[in-house]
Image (cartoon, rainbow, N blue to C red):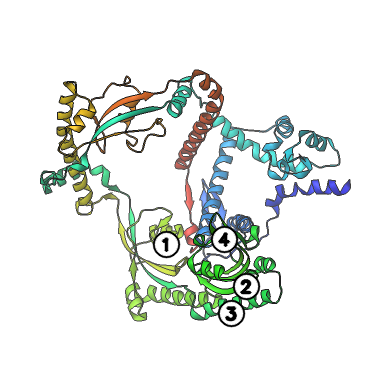
Amino acid sequence: MMTKLREMTFIFIWILVFAFVALMVFEWGMDFTGLQGRSNVVGKIDGQKITIQEFQEAVQNLYLQERESAGQEPDEERMTQIRDQVWEQFVQQVLFKKEIERRNIQVTDREIYLYMTQNPQSLPPAISENPNFMTDGTFDMSKYRQALQNPQIDWTPVENYLREVLPYQKLQNIVTASVMVTEEELKSDYIENNQKAKMTYLMVPSSAFFKDSVKASDKEIRNYYEKNKEDFRIEERRKLNYVLFSTTPTAPDSQRIIKLAKEIKAEAEAGEDFAMLADEYSEDPSVRSNHGDLGYFEKDRMVPEFSEAAFSAKPGEIVGPIQTNFGVHIIKVHDKRVQNGQEQVHASHILLKFEPSPLTLENSQDLAGNFAETAREDGFKEAADNFNYEVKQTPEFPRRNYLPGFGQLQSAVEWSFNEKENAVSSVYRTPQGYVVFEVDQVLPKGYRPLEEVESICRSRVEQQKRLELAREFAGNIQEQLNTGKSLLEIAQSDESSMMTLDSTDLFTRSQPSSKIGRSPEVLAAAFSLPIDSVSGMLETDRGIYFIKVTERTEIDEESFKNQKDAIRTRLMNQKSQQFFAEWYDNLKEKSNIEDNRYMFFTS
C-alpha cells in the first residue's frame, strides 16, 4: 500500500519541476565573444528584465523535452525555433500576468476544489493519464475520488499548480466572454458544408485570347503602376554579403563512419543481437519504436542502393556498409516472400549518418572567427580577397525571422536591422556551415521601383485586356441565349474553339468543384439560380462563365437540428481562439517589448 502511495505522490513532483531546473548554461548557439561588459539582459517586456540565465534555463528545459521525445539532438534550425518559442512564452507570461493583476483576477479555494473534483481529465497527463486512475484504459472517476479522499496523499502540489494556472484560464474566459454564435451563423455554416449543387457550364477562358492587341504598352504599364502603387509598398529591408565556411564532412570524417559501420557489422556477424546494436548505434529516428526493424517492404519502397542490397541478400545474411543519400546502412535480411505477385523482404537496418567530426567543426569555426576579426579591421571584401574566399550575397529581405538562403536565423536578421552598412557580424552557425555577414545595403521602406515590378504590371494589364476580349466574345453568347438557344446548342455551333462546355459533380460551397474554383460569383449563382435556368455572364479571374444548375439538394432540417450543438461548439471555439489571438496581438502592439537575443545567439 505504501509503495503505491509513494508512486502516486511521485507523479505530482513534475508539477514543481520548474523550481528545480539545473542552473547550467546551455551553450548551443551562444556567442561568448566580447561578453565582458555586456548586459546580461536578453530582453525587456514592459520594463521587466529577462536575464540570459533565466532564458537559458527555460531553453534548456524545453531542449531536454525535445531530445527525449524525438530521441535525437535538435539541429540548429530546431534550436532557433525552441528559443523563439521560449521567448514568446516569456512575453505571454509577463503580459498576461500584468493583465491578471490589472483586472484583479483571483482564484478561490472553492474554485480549485471544484476544478479538482469535476475536471480531472483536464489536469496534466501525470494525473489524467495515470494508470492508478484507469480501468480498462478509461479514466475511472471512482478511483480518482478515492485518492482525493485519502489523507495519506498530499495534493498540495496539484493545488499550487491550479493556483498558478487557473488565473490565466479565467483571463481568457473574461476576454472572450462577449463572443457569441448566432442562429444565423449556425444555419449558414450548416448550409455551407452540407447543401450541394451540380451544374453544366459554358466557359470562355481569358487564356484563349493571345493576340497582339493584348500586349501592354509602356504607357499602359506605367499607368497601371501609378494607379496601383500601394500593391508594391515595401518595408525596410536589408541586403547582406556573406562568406560561408562549409561543415561538409571531410574524407577522414566519412572514412571514420565507414570504419565504424564495418565494426558494427562484425559485431552482428559475431552473434550480437541486431536490435540491441540498432538501439545503440542507429541514427534513424524510428529506431526508438522499431529497434531497426523495417518490416516487410517491396523493392520500390526504398532507395535503389538499399533495395538492391536487401533483395540480393539471403535470409539471415548481414550486408553492408551500403551508402545512400541518408548515410551508411548495415542491413540484416530476416525473410523473403511473395505477396500479391510482389516480392517482399523483411529486414532490419542500422543507419549511420555522414556528419562532420568535432575537429572539422572546430577548424571551420576557427577559420570563420579569424576571417570575422580580419574583416572588421581591413574591410569585408578586402579580407575575403586576401584569404581567397568567395563573397556571396543574400536577396533583400524584411525584418522577419527568415533569412533567405539560411532559413530561420532570426538572430542574424535582428543583428542586421540593428547595424549600419559595412558592419561585420560575429560567426553564425547554420545548417550549411559557419557564416560571417556584412551589412551591404540598408534599404528604406517605400515602393518597389517600376523596373522591378514591370513584369507583374505587364501581366496584370494583359490579363485585363484578355478579360475584356473574353467579355466581348461572351456578349455574343448572351445574345444567343436571349434567343432561346441552349448552352449545348451554342457550344456545338461554335467554330472558334474559344469556349468550353462541361459539367460538375455535386459540390458544396466549402468544397467547390475544381473545375470552377472558388469564384464567389459562380458559387453564389450555383446556389441561388432556379433549377434548369441559365445565368447571365459571370466574370471570374479565369474568364467568363454561363452556368445552368441541374441539381441542388434541399436543407435537411432534422439533420441540422442533430448537428446544431456540435456546430455551435466548433464555431464558438474558432471565434474564441481568433478573438483571443487578436486581443493578444493588440496587447503586444501596445506593450514595450525589447528583444536583444541577437546579441547573445549566433544560430
Position of residue 453 measured from the top left corner of the image (x, y, whole percent): 23, 51
What residue appears at the point 29 percent right and 53 percent down from the top-left corner?
444
The type of residue carrying mark 3 is Lys
Q: Could you give the CA–CA distance between mark 2 and mark 4, rounded to whole angstroms?
A: 17 Å
Provide the residue designation for mark 1.
406
Judge the density around disc 2: few (<14), some (14-19), many (≥20) Cα neighbours within 10 Å: many
Helix, strand or loop at disc 2? strand
Q: Residue furthest right?
A: 1
Task: Classify residue 343 by image quadrant.
Answer: bottom right
Judge the density around disc 4: few (<14), some (14-19), many (≥20) Cα neighbours within 10 Å: some
Provide the residue designation for mark 4.
344
Q: Could you give the CA–CA distance between mark 2 and mark 1, rounded to whole angstroms?
A: 40 Å
The type of residue carrying mark 2 is Ile
Position of residue 375 measured from the top left corner of the image (x, y, whole percent): 38, 74
Q: Could you give the CA–CA distance between mark 1 and mark 4, rounded to whole angstroms?
A: 41 Å
Helix, strand or loop at disc 4? strand
Instruction: Identify the mark nearer the N-term, 3 or 2.
Output: 3
Provide the residue designation for mark 3.
259
Instruction: Identify the mark nearer the N-term, 3 or 1.
Output: 3
Q: Is residue 177 visible?
A: no
- Contact between marks 2 and 4 (CB within 8 A): the answer is no
